[in-house]
Image (spheres, helix red, strand yellow):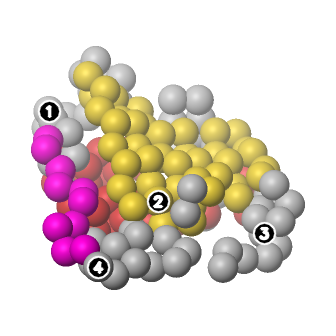
Amino acid sequence: MPEDMPADFDFLVRYGYGEVTKNEINTYQDTVVKDLIMNGTATADITLTEDEMRSIYERMRGIRIMGKLELVSLKQGCAVVPYQEDSWRITVNGFTRNWSWSGENCELTEDAEQLLELRTFIADIVAGKEEYQALPEAEGGYD
């Protein structure tokens, strides 16, 4: 990734539990989808600031997100239910990469842990936005 954030930098991350990846942060379309669990989803138009995008870009660059990532743990035999699942699409300088990872195994790879930390960082930025806070609260939970 170039040191300076390119003009075409965008990303989309979908996340949730099991195969229910209803949460979405999409800078391609400047939208956020919130999983309301029992009540479906709610969508808000949210545009991240240039500074927010730059800080996210720097974190992505720091973990070499456009390189080869090891996302599947070689240690098998233990499963978590429910488990988190993330799906990513990132565009930098006209090149787009897609990744998915799952927290189904009890142990995450270092790369998956870094993606989880990155997603949490981004979700915290979004959660602080007035438009996100105006969305309805989720009801229920995942077993």
Instruction: Name the main secondary structure of what is drawn in magenta.
Output: loop
Distance Cα–Cα, label 2 vs label 1: 28 Å
User: Which of 44/74 is in front?
Assistant: 74
Tally the numbered discs: 4
The quadrant where residue 93 appears: top left
User: Circle 2 — which element?
Assistant: strand
Compare marks 4 and 3 and give the one earlier in the sequence: 4
Mark 3 lies on residue: 138
- Residue pictured at 55% horizontal, 63% vertical: 18
Quarter of the image with the N terminus is top left
Compare marks 1 and 4 and give the one earlier in the sequence: 1
Distance Cα–Cα, label 3 vs label 2: 18 Å
Which mark's residue is nearer the viewer, 3 or 1?
Answer: 3
Left or right of residue 8: residue 27: right
Mark 1 lies on residue: 2
Q: Magenta stretch?
A: 67-76
Residue 5 vertical position relative to residue 16 in the rendered view, above or below: above
- Numbered mark located on residue 77 in the image: 4
Distance Cα–Cα, label 3 vs label 1: 39 Å
Mark 2 lies on residue: 85
Three-letter amino acid code at the position of disc 4: Gly
